[in-house]
Image (cartoon, rainbow, N blue to C red):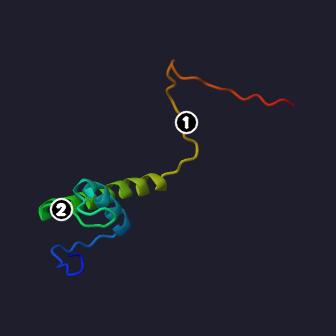
Amino acid sequence: MANDLEVLFHFETKNIDQVESCIKSFMKVAKYRKYKEIYQVNINIIKKAIKDCDFKINEFNKSIIKYNKKQKGGNIKNIIDNNEVLYMLIPFL
């Protein structure tokens, strides 16, 4: 069965490993054979899952890259809630 497979859908992405992991987690409930990557599901569901995974991964990667480019030094929390516990370290000389 798995030896003579025909390619039904071709998708190119820059995030191959991330998309593959995402698809495997989505398709876990549709797994046909244990310990094999064979799924029993409509091809349109797989196509949609692949496109959604790629879109979300690209979106998160862009956010992470944008965040990492910002200068992080000197960040100060302006508002301190009354429910927060604050600690102060006073070193002994």
Residue 57 x/y as whole percent = 32, 58
Disc 2 crowd, CA 10 A, few/some/many (<14, 14-19, 20+): few
According to the picture, the residue beneath numbered tag 1 turns out to be 76
Q: Which SS class for mark 2?
A: loop
Q: On the rendered structure, is 70 left or right of 17?
A: right
User: Which is nearer the eye, 25 or 80?
Assistant: 25
According to the picture, the residue beneath numbered tag 2 turns out to be 40
In percent of the image, x 17 and y 73: which residue is there? 9
Question: Where 73 falls versus 36 (above or below)?
Answer: above
In percent of the image, x 48 and y 52: which residue is there? 70
Circle 2: residue type: Gln
Q: Quadrant of the N terminus?
A: bottom left
User: Which is nearer the eye, 81 or 22?
Assistant: 22
Q: Which SS class for mark 1?
A: loop
Q: On the rendered structure, is 78 left or right of 44?
A: right
Circle 1: residue type: Ile
Residue 92 x/y as whole percent = 84, 29
Disc 1 crowd, CA 10 A, few/some/many (<14, 14-19, 20+): few
